[in-house]
Amino acid sequence: MEENRRKDLKKAGKGFTIDSILSAGSSAGGNVAKESITSMVGDILVDSASSLVPVVSGAVQGYKRARFERNIVVFTEELYAKINEVNMNMEEKTDKQKEKIDQLFAYIMDYVIDEQQEEKIAYMVNGFVNVTHHEQISDDFILTYYDVLKELRMVDIGVLKLMYSSRYVLDHENRESYQDVMERHGLNYEQYEAVRRNLHRIGVLTTRTDLNIYSDLEEISKKFKELYSYLEKLTNPKHKRSLPKLKEPKLKSKDNFEVSKFGRDFVTFFLDLD
């Protein structure tokens, strides 16, 4: 069902292009330009994909239509704020690359339409702007990244931003603490840890255990060999006086969370923290 919807949205996307949006945005100034883009995107999505966009179905409640319209407005405002950057990126693209970006744009609009937390739409626009930076980008890449973003709530994003900033952002003065994040989202520490475990499950966080499990297994194997040698000498009267001193294995694994490689790429693609 979801795959069929995306195929039809791809067809719907042929009704508008990034060039047409850029043209609408540059043909007028300020609020008029934003209204032009909003009207164009909204009308084409409704007209071209009426059987697929949930908000246009007669059986769907009115609040979904309201969400659809609100999300389009928010998306337009966020996109318009970065229209010059998108325009510069698109000027360097070939016709074939533009066609691919138009296709990916239709996919991204699918996520925008369904999003329940409109604050996340700014991140979706950041992702699209990064799409226009790339010379080549695959459907699978986009769908994977946007599927992960779809699964995250704003509280998840807040904790992920904190985890990333604490390690990779140099502005220590203005950096939030985990207490700030907990207070903003109304979390206690147990809930904060639950969010981090969820981020770990999704794959944007990792632990030292994940990173060092192989070396720890080697260390354990080494200590087992030493123990076996020790026991062998212990049962042999000739070697009792030369028994080596056994040492505890030095394991690196800890359950401290940190941002994974995928998480770092995800943050760079969507959250614009650097």
Image: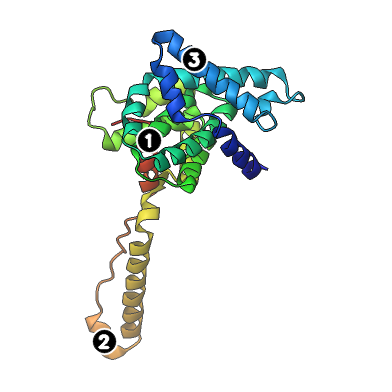
Q: Report the mark closest to the observer, 3 or 1.
A: 3
Q: Nearer the viewer, residue 135 or 194?
A: 135
Tag 1 residue: 132
Q: Which residue is mark 3?
A: 36
Label 2 – label 3 distance at C-alpha: 89 Å
Label 1: few (<14), some (14–19) or many (≥20) C-alpha neighbours in 10 Å: many
The span from disc 1 to disc 2 (Cα, nearest Å) is 71 Å
Q: Quadrant of residue 113?
A: top right
Would residue 73 be visible to someone looking at this image? no
**Badge 3 vs badge 1, beta-carbon distance below 8 Å:** no
Tell me what residue is drawn at x 47 percent, y 20 percent: 76
> N-terminal of the two: label 3 or label 1?
3
Name the residue: 70% across, 31% down. 51
**The N terminus lies in quadrant:** top right
Q: Residue furthest bottom?
A: 238
Check disc 3 and give the amino acid type: Ser
Viewer can see residue 231: yes
Characterize the local packing of mark 3: few (<14), some (14-19) or many (20 or more) Cα atoms within 10 angstroms: many
- Between circles 2 and 3, the one closer to the viewer is 3
| Residue at disc 1, secondary structure | helix
Q: CA separation, marks 3 and 1? A: 21 Å
Residue 77 lies, in percent from the top left, at: 45, 17
Up-down relation of residue 61 to residue 212 (above or below): above
* Left or right: where 169 falls relative to 34: left
- The kind of secondary structure element at disc 2 is helix
Question: In the rendered structure, which disc, 1 or 2, sits on the residue that comes first in sequence?
Answer: 1
Q: Residue at x 77, y 25 (%)?
A: 59
Q: Which residue is mark 2?
A: 239
